Image: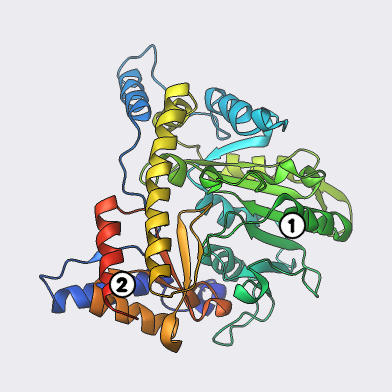
């Protein structure tokens, strides 16, 4: 009989959002007339901006003509998109990125999970806690996590981020090889300033660590002292890989498109202690396992960098951030302690009345018919916290706030 990958068997049986869906579906069956407002999973609701839709239509027409038809594209992405990424996301911020350092993909979730393919299973990883579950689960699948005690994995270094330390992770006491950072942060919605991020870059340079920097929400940054890219920090190109996504920036959650930047000077060592550059390793991985994002979706992504596209995206992001403001103010009005929602579309709150994260989830679902995400699902330090997203409509957000405040928690 063939054998399975035992690391998959170590994973908890239920993924966080699967368990949320199960509880919501059970409640809906028992209460078929209930109008549930969903603010749990971070999926967008606004339609894709008009310039991207036009570009998608034009790309479809290209596929209907033999002179403009596109079959297999470059696994790294088309230059018409990579050049716009380099110019608009980096050059305009004073950062130089070469086209062959940019790899277009089907989203940051895939990239943050797949990047482990080119890294040794012997590496020690560190994560902020709470954390986006994919960072942990994909390392469990790869065999880097050790054993699970019901709360933590034995071989993972957890860096607590709570109200007590203002959600700023302390440098780990145990040196990790790989450090996952996500800012603006999912799930807490908090950020690091340039000086605070510099501490991590300096640490990685001194200790020979690799930073995997997820900046999927950089377009939501409003404050000037919050960096949009880790490469704004001196020396970061020597120690960091950056992940970006068009999902929350341009509403591409259903289209799937993102990219990763792997600087050419970034290097690790092999089993014999020899220097190995990561850029060609990632290129080899992508050309072997990935056929590239579709021509259609890359044309849509390229259109968002036009002047009209940038204007339309800003309007959509402003819409969501208005929802975040409504959530923040509404929750604060009833004495709930609230974080995030200023530079990110997530509002992170302390559960009231000593309720656990799942107890608060059930109370909101049953008494207010509002769905959020229990903080403990993001890690042990998330216990006693709860996440709400700003991706609903204004009308749904207003009603959700009214329902929650009516509970008189």
Q: Residue at x 43, y 29 (%)?
A: 311
At 51% across and 46% down in the image, what residue appears? 220
Q: Please state if 153 lies on the left or on the right of 42 as rendered.
A: right
Q: How many marks?
A: 2
Looking at the image, tell me whether mark 1 or mark 2 is earlier in sequence order.
1
Q: Nearer the viewer, residue 23 or 78?
A: 23
Q: Considering only vertical position in the picture, is 399 above or below 261?
A: below
Seen from the viewer's position, the closer of residues 189 and 265 is 189
Identify the element where label 1 is drawn: helix
Q: Residue furthest top?
A: 67
Q: Which mark is residue 405?
A: 2
Horizontal and vertical percent position of residue 340: 52, 61
Asked whether, in this view, residue 317 is left or right of residue 199, the answer is left
Give the secondary structure at mark 2: helix
For the C terminus, give its image quadrant: bottom left
385 above or below 74? below
Q: In the rendering, at what x and y percent does residue 267 appear?
A: 81, 47
What residue is rendered at 60% in x and 74% in y? 163
Residue at the front extreme, as displayed: 333
- Inspect this view and state whether residue 71 appears: no
Name the residue tied to disc 1. Answer: 196
Q: Residue furthest left?
A: 33
* Figure quadrant of residue 37: bottom left
The span from disc 1 to disc 2 (Cα, nearest Å) is: 35 Å
Image: 401 above or below 306:
below
Disc 1 packing (10 Å; few <14; some 14–19; many ≥20): few
User: Residue 54's mark?
Assistant: none
Q: Is residue 391 above or below residue 2?
A: above
Q: At x 55% / y 45%, what residue is drawn?
A: 222
């Amino acid at each position: 009989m063939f054998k399975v990958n035992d690391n998959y068997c170590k994973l908890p049986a239920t993924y966080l959002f699967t368990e949320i869906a199960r509880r919501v579906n059970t409640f809906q069956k028992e209460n078929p007339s209930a109008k549930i407002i969903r603010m749990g999973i971070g999926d967008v609701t606004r339609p894709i901006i008009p310039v991207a839709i036009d570009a998608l239509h034009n790309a479809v027409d290209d596929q209907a003509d033999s002179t403009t038809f596109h079959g297999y594209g470059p696994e790294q992405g088309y230059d018409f998109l990579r050049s716009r990424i380099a110019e608009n996301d980096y050059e305009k911020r004073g950062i130089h990125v070469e086209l062959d350092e940019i790899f277009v993909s089907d989203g940051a979730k895939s990239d943050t999970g797949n990047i482990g393919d080119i890294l040794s299973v012997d590496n020690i990883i560190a994560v902020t806690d709470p954390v986006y579950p994919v960072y942990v689960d994909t390392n469990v699948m790869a065999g880097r996590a050790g054993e699970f005690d019901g709360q933590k994995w034995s071989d993972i270094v957890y860096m607590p981020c709570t109200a007590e330390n203002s959600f700023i992770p302390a440098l780990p006491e145990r040196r990790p090889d790989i450090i996952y950072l996500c800012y603006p942060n999912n799930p807490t919605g908090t950020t690091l300033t340039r000086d605070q991020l510099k501490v991590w870059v300096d640490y990685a340079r001194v200790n020979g660590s690799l930073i995997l920097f997820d900046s999927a929400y950089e377009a939501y940054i409003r404050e000037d002292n919050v960096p949009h890219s880790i490469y704004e920090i001196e020396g970061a190109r020597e120690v960091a890989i950056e992940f970006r996504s068009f999902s929350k920036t341009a509403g591409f959650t259903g289209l799937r498109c993102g990219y990763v930047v792997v600087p050419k000077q970034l290097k690790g060592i092999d089993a014999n202690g020899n220097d190995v550059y990561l850029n060609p390793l990632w290129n080899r991985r992508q050309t072997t396992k990935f056929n590239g994002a579709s021509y259609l979706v890359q044309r849509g992504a390229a259109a968002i960098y036009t002047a009209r596209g940038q204007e339309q995206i800003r309007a959509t992001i402003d819409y969501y951030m208005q929802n975040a403001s409504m959530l923040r103010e509404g929750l604060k009005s009833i004495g709930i302690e609230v974080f995030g929602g200023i530079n990110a579309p997530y509002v992170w709150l302390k559960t009231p009345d000593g309720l656990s994260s799942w107890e608060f989830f059930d109370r909101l679902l049953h008494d207010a018919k509002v769905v959020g995400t229990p903080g403990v699902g993001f890690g042990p330090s998330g216990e006693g916290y709860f996440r709400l997203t700003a991706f609903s409509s204004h009308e749904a957000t207003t009603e959700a706030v009214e329902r929650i405040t009516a509970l008189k928690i």
